[in-house]
Amino acid sequence: MARRLVVIGAPSSAGSYAAGQESAPRVLRERGLIEALRASGRDVTDDGDGPLHVWRPDRDRPRAQNLGEVIASVDAVARQVGAALDAGSDALVIGGNCTIALGAVSALAERFAEPGLLYLDRHFDLNTPSTTSDGALDWMGLAHALGLPGSLPGLQSALAHIPLLTPERVHLLGVDPDATTEGEQRARAELRLVWRTGDELALHPVSETQRALARLAPGPLVVHLDVDVLDFTDAPLAEDTGGRNTGPSLDAVAESLETACHDESVRVLTVAELNPTRSAGDPSVLDRFVAVLARAFAVD
Ligand SMILES: [Mn+2]
């Protein structure tokens, strides 16, 4: 029998370049997310939202903007996911920024010995305030999970362990190797991270996902989707508009998510960096995305 599913909103764009992602939980609910998940056969509880934070420039801390708000969002996700796990449920977390993955893995790490993370993202998210000047914490999450030099102690102290993850417990899919900083390139080589490109994910969404699940077995696992992994022309959902005509289609990512979420080891799916203003001219993509999430969790 399928486990129950708890839906959690993390309406924060504190770690972003600008406002927008904080409205994703509200907009997806308005487009029928909860009803679609129920229609797919799951016993769904909507646990509501964590703290609302709208991005604003942080002139006091320009290279780690809105750190306190980012930590509060990570904390709230960890608490809400933890409660879902304690009730024997799976969780779907709608962000928000990519840092929500830290909260989800942290909740698993408080309860299980060796959680893992399957990370679908155009980026490595291995930055720290010393490797990028933009100050957006939403692409510094994996650096903090892995405990890279330059990590912020305040953000790390919100995690169940330091480091939260070892490189062996992480698998990245959909990366654009050109969309990295020099610091990320050094870190990924030193850590020997296992990663596949967006082209590889586009061509082989099922087998690449199966390979990742086999490598990370037995879990339990968080699957993280930054919607910037998608070809922006096919599915204009992401804050980052750079992925035009590159990366997997929404159909390909749907196959990957369906494969992952039907695996017993996967307990949490986190969805991040969805900025609803990006699809204002093509709002049907939001309905397509809701359908993809429902298909991912559908009971066979
Ligand atoms: Mn990204």
Image (cartoon, rainbow, N blue to C red):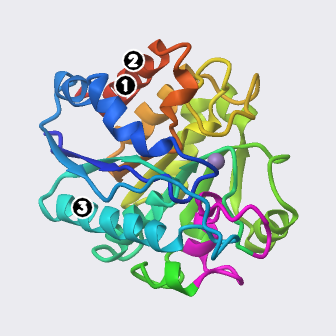
Give the image quarter of residue 234: top right
Horizontal arrangement in the rendering, residue 267 relative to residue 95 (left or right) = left
The residue located at (42%, 73%) in the rendering is 114
Q: Amino acid at mark 3?
A: Gln
What is the CA distance from the residue labelled 2 to the residue labelled 3? 26 Å
Name the residue that disc number 2 marks: 287
Q: Nearer the viewer, residue 54 or 259?
A: 54
Residue 53 in picture, x, y percent from top left = 41, 56
Q: Is residue 131 magenta?
A: yes
Instruction: Work out whether mark 2 precedes mark 3 in sequence or the reverse, and give the earlier one.
Output: 3
Q: Which residue is mark 1?
A: 290
Q: Residue under circle 3?
A: 80
Instruction: Give the percent coordinates (x, y) of residue 139.
Output: 64, 58
Quadrant (top left, top right, bottom left, bottom right) of the N terminus: top left
Q: Tell me residue 78's x, y (percent).
A: 32, 67
Q: Quadrant of residue 131?
A: bottom right
What's the distance in space between the residues labelled 3 and 1, CA to CA?
Answer: 22 Å
| Mark 2 vs mark 1, CA separation in Å | 5 Å
Q: Nearer the viewer, residue 156 or 203?
A: 156
The reply, left or right, for residue 225 in relation to residue 2 is: right
**Label 1 is placed on what type of residue?**
Val
Residue 285 location (% of width, % of height): 49, 18
Q: Secondary structure at mark 2?
A: helix
CB at disc 3 and ligand 1 closer than 8 Å: no
Residue at the location (60% across, 67% down)? 58
